[in-house]
Amino acid sequence: MIAVLGLVVGVVAGLLVRPEVPAMVEPYLPIAVVAALDAVFGGLRAMLDGIFDDKVFVVSFLSNVVVAALIVFLGDKLGVGAQLSTGVVVVLGIRIFSNAAAIRRHIFRA
């Protein structure tokens, strides 16, 4: 319940404050969000499988975001940022859909 309350408070605060993303960070934000979603779906799957560990979740969440952002940053420096961004999104998207399928199978037994 605390997590849901925190989510609601965060969304309301974001809507009221309307923070602006610095232009320097803007290209990395979508990749960071996809990486964070991968960690969230992985955590949900682990919870349903009964193997969830909060320390593993936090480390996975932070490392996914940092590694994805570093890959895109490196791609920008090498001049292939769009290609590496697409690669990161494809890989993380596959993981997200794999976790979503496992969650669906667990919930609906199908």
Image (cartoon, grey):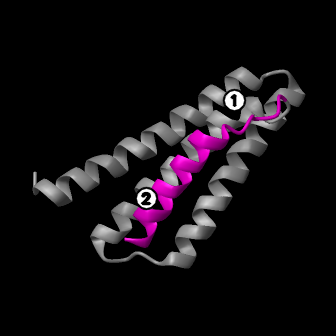
Q: Residue, x 71% and y 39% (percent of image)?
A: 19
Image x and y of residue 34, in percent = 55, 41
Magenta residues (range): 1-23
Image x and y of residue 80, in percent = 78, 22
For mark 1, give the secondary structure: helix
Magenta stretch contains residue 3:
yes
Residue nearer the viewer, 78 or 49: 49
Magenta stretch contains residue 53:
no
Q: Residue, x 66% and y 29% (percent of image)?
A: 85
- Type of residue at label 2? Gly
Image x and y of residue 65, in percent = 66, 51
- Type of residue at label 1? Leu
Q: Is residue 97 left or right of residue 60?
A: left
For mark 2, give the secondary structure: helix
Residue at image mark 1: 84
Residue 42, label in figure: 2
Image x and y of residue 91, in percent = 53, 38
